[in-house]
Amino acid sequence: MARRLLTEFGMGTSLRRGDYTQAAKRAVQDALWHNSINLAELFGFEKTDMLITVDVGVQKPDEVDVAEIAAVFPYGQPTIQVHEGGLDIPRPEGTGNPTIIANVALSVAFDMEKADV
């Protein structure tokens, strides 16, 4: 049974390029860089055992490359879901790409029941 042990939140932006993936990657990095908790070692697991659930909120979910988001994680098993959320802020002059804000909720869990080998 997987047990969630940690939840972090992050926010990322794409100021001028209109890049939803970049904003989401920055939000994930923001959430990750909040912590330096050694959960795996604390519970006797390998870092590769981490079950990572990532919920991303942006205004245009279909424009997020999930593989690029997964590549941000140096270890663990990320599962990424992209939802409608975040915020697009139009340019004052009304032309060009909006400023994109992505929000992320990131949870780390471990399967606390060790399998018999």
Image (tube, grey):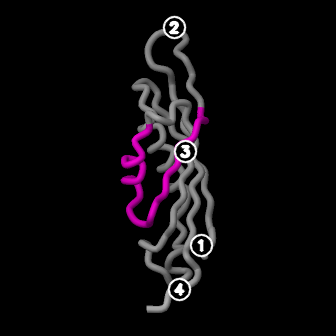
Q: Residue at x 58, y 60 (%)?
A: 107
Which residue in the structure is indicated by mark 4? 114
C-alpha separation, residue under disc 3 versus residue under disc 4: 30 Å
Where does residue 71 sit, x and y in percent of width and height? Answer: 36, 53
Q: Quadrant of the C terminus?
A: bottom left
Regarding mark 4 in the picture, which secondary structure is present there?
A: loop
Q: Which residues are magenta?
A: 64-86
Q: Do the residues under discs 1 and 4 have CB atoms within 8 angstroms?
A: no
Which residue in the structure is indicated by mark 1? 2
Q: Do the residues under discs 3 and 1 have CB atoms within 8 angstroms?
A: no
Q: Amino acid at mark 2?
A: Glu
Which residue in the structure is indicated by mark 2? 93
Crowding near the residue tagged with mark 2, few <14, some 14–19, many ≥20 C-alpha atoms within 10 Å: few
Which residue in the structure is indicated by mark 3? 56
C-alpha separation, residue under disc 2 versus residue under disc 1: 49 Å
C-alpha separation, residue under disc 2 versus residue under disc 3: 29 Å
Of the image marks 3 and 1, the number of the one nearer the N terminus? 1
Where does residue 63 sit, x and y in percent of width and height? Answer: 44, 33
